Amino acid sequence: MKQPEIPEPPGEFDVRPLVRQLSPYAPGEQPKGAGWIKLNTNENPYPPSPKVLKAVRAAVDGRLRLYPDPTASTLRARLAKLHGCAPDHILVGNGSDEALALAVRAFVEPLDSVLGRSEPARATVQFFHPSYSLYPILAAIHGARPLPVRLDPDFQLPSDDQLAPAGWNRHAALTLITTPNAPSGRGYGRQELERVCEATSGVVVLDEAYADFAREHALPLALRGSRVLVARTFSKAYSLCAQRVGYLVGPPPLIEAMGRIKDSYNVNTLGQTAALATLADLAHCRRNLRRIIATRERLRRELLGLGFEVAPSEANFLLVRPPGPPAEEWLSAFRRRRILVRWFNLDELRDRLRITVGTDAEADALLRAASGVLRRRA
Ligand SMILES: *Cc1c(COP(=O)(O)O)cnc(C)c1O
């Protein structure tokens, strides 16, 4: 049957005001061409295991015409075994970024839908500041209320007494915690995270993108409670940024809710294959983790020796306050020497640089460049 034509009022086919006004996430630069030392996006400097590359190559054939396993069931079963839980505790995402977006969409009301009611907590996405700069953007995209809660200058978590003065909302629908913290690298203990989780009645996602570089992780909190999820990624510690595979571990009712709203085929076949092959050769990743941690500690000592302030880090990056010229000038000075690092134009971070821990050779190049900058000024 032919639909009656409804004339559109002129100007109504337009980009939504929310989208027009949105400041999108600014990813770190991915330079074209060779010869760059990339210490700006926390990628792993070591390639995936040869067994992973072989498995991915072997999966590139006529089967590319088929849709992927919609629920990544083999990968979920393998991850469940790794973490000592059942597969219904696990949701795999197209990177943990997608998993975080699903959490916002599943657990947070858009502000419009709570207008006129007194308590906007149902529409609140709470997170510590500074932490992962994607969180406020996910809230904004959803039309929810972003609620930053300030960390102290050492990036420590607030004590119970400090939470309320810092602006903490005990009923926020969703709280996102980067642990270890980014961009500082500060690690948090399981007990203090548990204390913070207990200070809210809403859902909490512990974003453990860097947990493999840290002393402690908080996975048990996601397996015991009813409101805590842990987000993990194959990107950083497992050298698979390009494949976009991350996952959430947590209570089955929350996992099931997010599964309802995800894209049917959210994780591509080669990504699932690469993740499975990675789990079959964890020894390769553990070796690289040990090397990265050793390089991190050496780079920290040597930067301290050059007069940099360096926050202690339990991640694969260092947050530094450079001596001499402003951090933004250091960014350009490194860039002229084909070294990319990250600078954040935020009040709390403007005088800092975030430097990814690369190989030992990359650390040496960075240290040579830094000495060069300092000599030129002397
Ligand atoms: C890199 C990063 C992510 C995203 O990881 P993907 O799995 O590559 O999407 C999530 N959270 C934090 C804190 C990160 O640094």
Image (spheres, rainbow, N blue to C red):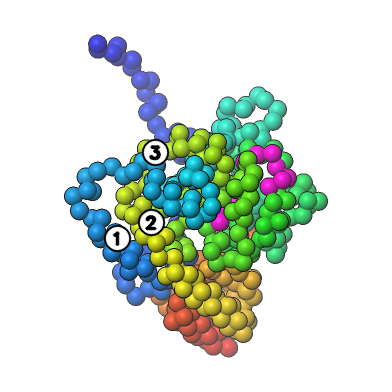
Q: Nearer the viewer, residue 167 or 372?
A: 167
**Placement of 228 over or under 243, stated as above or below:** above
Check disc 2 and report the residue beneath it. 276
At 64% across and 54% down in the image, what residue appears? 129
Check disc 1 and report the residue beneath it. 55
Q: Quadrant of the C terminus?
A: bottom right
At 48% across and 53% down in the image, what residue appears? 81
Q: Residues within 10 Å of mark 2 (few under 14, many from 20)?
A: some
At 55% across and 36% down in the image, what residue appears? 253
The image position of residue 23, as x and y in percent, is 50, 47
Q: Does residue 348 appear in this view? A: yes
Helix, strand or loop at mark 1? helix
Residue 213 painted magenta: no
What type is the residue that disc 1 sits on?
Ala
The residues colored magenta run 197-208
**Which sits earlier in the primary sequence, circle 3 or circle 2?**
3
What type is the residue that disc 3 sits on?
Asp
Q: Nearer the viewer, residue 91 or 344?
A: 91
Horizontal side of residue 202 vs 93, given as left or right? right
The image position of residue 126, as x and y in percent, is 63, 45
**Which sits earlier in the primary sequence, circle 3 or circle 1?**
1
Helix, strand or loop at mark 2? helix
**Which sits earlier in the primary sequence, circle 1 or circle 2?**
1
Horizontal side of residue 36 vs 293, given as left or right? left
At 62% across and 27% down in the image, what residue appears? 114
Contact, CB < 8 Å: mark 3 with mark 1? Answer: no
Check disc 3 and report the residue beneath it. 263
What type is the residue that disc 2 sits on?
Leu
Mark pair 1, 2: CA separation:
9 Å
User: Is label 3's Cβ within 8 Å of ligand 1?
Assistant: no
Helix, strand or loop at mark 3? loop
Contact, CB < 8 Å: mark 1 with mark 2? Answer: yes
